[in-house]
């Protein structure tokens, strides 16, 4: 298929039918000559889906049938391009009309043409209806998630929505074992790449504009990695020391495992587990590039009898699977994929992993629980439930000047263009017998 609008419509349809993620679906089109337009439009359609759907609803005389989701997605894509991109409007309309033939629906030609021309004509008036009174549509959040965020973060909700709708920054983690942040900043300047330093983690740099990793000096030699600043806070919270045995229980693609190894060179051992064998290859690639070593295990971390040799760990990082509501700016498909019922089942999975892994922690040892979620059900409530049911677990507050202190744990909310992702951290200590 060569029509780029039809490709975007198909990607959107798959997402709405819960068949794949944006990343994997886009991966099939990397060689398309218009890949950057396909990528930009697919991200944009996800980011603004609920606003675009509302605009479309006002332009249609009656809703489309379920079996015509492809035509609906085609018009959503076209509306996105007319609204947000600087592309020739006639090209958007002509190409979208001819894309109806890709779906073998010539009857839709007239409809697509009329809807898009209607948008051109009535743009201002339609946009006004969005901003007046339809908050969740204007902000393009699904209603259930807008309600959760408004209820849980009433003071910060508007900035959470706004920052989650921005394009994310490209953030680097300087390998402080190989160069200082200042030295690397100079290398970047010499290469003509503008950047500024992060304010939370001493390894973080924000690029003014995203760049391919091949443009980053010394990337292949492990001088630097790509990682959000929120994740870069992990090693310091783990209170690493020489001689420790460390476990990263949900490790792929390995950003945090690698950073732990960069931060403390004299660990006795590092173990990185992930359920997905395919994703372990990503950890291996990262370790090789950075010249680091970890014991890689493909397993369900909760099934400890399948992978644990019985030697307790001094430190455990549980970067738990979660709703990813803190990283919507990087993964806008979260808005389409996540359903309210999943939040409770994620909470159960998180609790299960936490209680199983607790057995692998040495008395006196420390477990750091993290998620990239903004929802308390997955964060402080998971920790509260665990503390209620675990006698030898002690909560340690994180003393810091960043984020919001919660009843149990500390929450970063999604930052601006030079700020971190939304992320949650809680430190638990196992009491000595
Ligand atoms: C939030 S990501 C981890 C990101 C990683 N810590 C990093 O910084 O690069 C969650 C990972 O957990 C893995 N996962 C989910 N459930 C798991 C389980 N029960 N056992 C092991 N890994 C699991 C997923 O495959 C996914 O790679």
Image (spheres, rainbow, N blue to C red):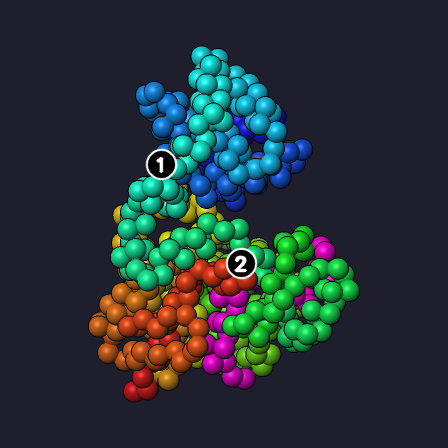
| Mark 1 lies on residue | 129
- Residue 142 visible somewhere in the drawing: no
Residue at coordinates 50% horizontally, 41% vertically from top-left?
44
Q: Which of 272 and 67 is in front in this view?
A: 67
| Mark 2 lies on residue | 417
Question: Horizontal and vertical percent for residue 90?
Answer: 59, 23
Q: Distance between the residues labelled 2 and 1?
A: 28 Å
Question: Horizontal and vertical percent for residue 144?
Answer: 29, 47
Residue with the most extreme right position: 190
The quadrant where residue 134 appears:
top left
Residue 40 magenta-drawn? no
Residues drawn in magenta: 214-242
**For the residue carrying disc 1, how many other residues have a C-alpha within 10 Å: few (<14), some (14-19), or many (20+)?**
some
Residue at coordinates 31% horizontally, 78% vertically from top-left?
395
Question: Horizontal and vertical percent for residue 312?
Answer: 41, 77
The quadrant where residue 309 appears:
bottom left
Q: Quadrant of the N terminus?
A: top right
């Amino acid at each position: 298929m060569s029509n780029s609008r039809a490709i975007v419509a198909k990607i959107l349809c798959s997402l709405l039918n819960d068949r794949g993620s944006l990343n994997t679906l886009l991966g099939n089109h990397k060689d398309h000559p218009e890949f950057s337009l396909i990528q930009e439009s697919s991200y944009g359609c996800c980011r603004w889906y609920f606003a675009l759907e509302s605009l479309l609803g006002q332009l249609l005389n009656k809703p489309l049938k379920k079996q015509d989701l492809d035509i609906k997605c085609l018009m959503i894509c076209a509306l996105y391009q007319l609204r947000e991109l600087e592309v020739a409007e006639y090209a958007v309309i002509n190409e979208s009309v001819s894309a109806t033939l890709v779906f073998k629906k010539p009857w839709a030609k007239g409809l697509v043409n009329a809807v898009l021309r209607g948008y051109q004509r009535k743009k201002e008036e339609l946009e006004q209806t969005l901003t007046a009174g339809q908050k969740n549509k204007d902000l393009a959040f699904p209603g259930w998630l807008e309600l959760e965020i408004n209820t849980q973060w009433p003071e910060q909700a508007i900035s959470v929505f706004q920052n989650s709708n921005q394009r994310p920054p490209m953030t680097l983690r300087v390998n402080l074992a190989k160069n200082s942040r200042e030295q690397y900043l100079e290398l970047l300047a010499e290469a003509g790449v503008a950047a500024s330093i992060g304010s939370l983690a001493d390894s973080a740099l924000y690029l003014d504009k995203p760049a391919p990793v091949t443009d980053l000096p010394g990337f292949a030699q492990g001088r630097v990695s790509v990682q959000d600043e929120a994740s870069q806070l992990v090693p310091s919270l783990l209170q690493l020391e020489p001689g420790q045995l460390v476990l990263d229980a949900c490790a792929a693609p390995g950003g945090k495992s690698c950073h732990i190894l960069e931060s403390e060179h004299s660990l006795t051992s590092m173990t990185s587990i992930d359920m997905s064998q395919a994703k372990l290859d990503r950890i291996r690639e990262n370790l090789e590039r950075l010249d680091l070593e970890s014991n890689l295990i493909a397993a369900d971390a909760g099934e400890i009898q399948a992978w644990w040799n019985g030697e307790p760990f001094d430190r455990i990082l549980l970067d738990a699977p979660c709703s990813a509501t803190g990283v919507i700016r990087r993964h806008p498909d979260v808005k389409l994929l996540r359903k309210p019922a999943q939040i409770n089942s994620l909470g159960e999975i998180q609790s299960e992993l936490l209680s199983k892994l607790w057995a692998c922690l040495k008395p006196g040892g420390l477990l750091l629980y993290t998620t990239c979620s903004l929802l308390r059900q997955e964060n402080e409530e998971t920790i509260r439930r665990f503390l209620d049911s675990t006698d030898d677990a002690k909560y340690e507050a994180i003393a810091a000047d960043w984020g919001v202190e919660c009843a149990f744990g500390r929450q970063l909310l999604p930052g601006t263009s030079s700020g971190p992702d939304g992320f949650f951290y809680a430190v638990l200590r196992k009491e000595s017998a």
